[in-house]
């Protein structure tokens, strides 16, 4: 039997936000807390125009609204995927959060032309 997609039942905004956090963790790895295994992300991107860059990807600003939405951060924390450290600037992505298959990376992370 194939694995269940989105077993934690994340909504669309939560999936997009987690996907962006995962991409940030890959593009600019943060400090890893030895005790918990959480990766601290303290350099969240800022949009210029209607988009922003994450590593070699471009992301539409409309796909990133969850980065500044405290309810999304709280939901990710409640589900064990992240830990809020200093909203909206610092979040720690858990190992579970880094490994969670959102299945939507290719639909919101695009190659960039500049």
Image: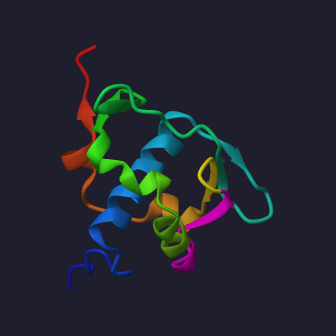
Question: Looking at the picture, how far across and down is residue 111, in whole percent?
Answer: 24, 28
Q: Is 27 drawn above or below residue 62 in the view shown?
A: above
Q: Is 21 drawn above or below residue 78 in the view shown?
A: above
Q: Quadrant of the N terminus?
A: bottom left
Of 114 and 30, the residue lying toward us:
114
Q: Quadrant of the C terminus?
A: top left
Question: Is residue 54 toward the left or the right of residue 105 in the image?
Answer: right
Q: Is 18 drawn above or below residue 81 in the view shown?
A: above
Of 81 and 17, the residue lying toward us:
17
Q: Is residue 53 magenta?
A: no
Of 32 and 16, the residue lying toward us:
16
Q: Residue at 31% x, 26% y: name it.
A: 49
Task: Name which quarter of the figure residue 112 lies in.
Answer: top left
Q: Is residue 81 magenta?
A: yes
Q: Residue at 37% x, 52% y: name it.
A: 65
Question: Looking at the picture, how far across and down is residue 43, in whole percent?
Answer: 60, 37
Question: Is residue 22 toward the left or the right of residue 93 in the image?
Answer: left
Q: Residue at 55% x, 72% y: name it.
A: 74
* Residue extent of the magenta highlight: 77-86
Of 96 and 57, the residue lying toward us:
57
């Amino acid at each position: 039997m194939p694995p269940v997609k989105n077993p934690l039942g994340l909504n669309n905004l939560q999936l997009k936000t987690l996907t962006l956090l995962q991409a940030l963790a890959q593009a600019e790895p943060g400090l890893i807390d030895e005790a918990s295994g959480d990766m601290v992300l303290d350099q969240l991107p800022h949009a210029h125009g209607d988009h922003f860059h994450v590593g070699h990807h471009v992301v539409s600003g409309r796909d990133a609204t969850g980065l500044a939405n405290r309810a999304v951060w709280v939901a990710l924390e409640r589900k064990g995927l992240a830990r809020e450290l200093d909203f909206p600037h610092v979040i720690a992505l858990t190992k579970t959060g880094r490994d969670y298959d959102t299945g939507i990376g290719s639909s919101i992370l695009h190659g960039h032309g500049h």
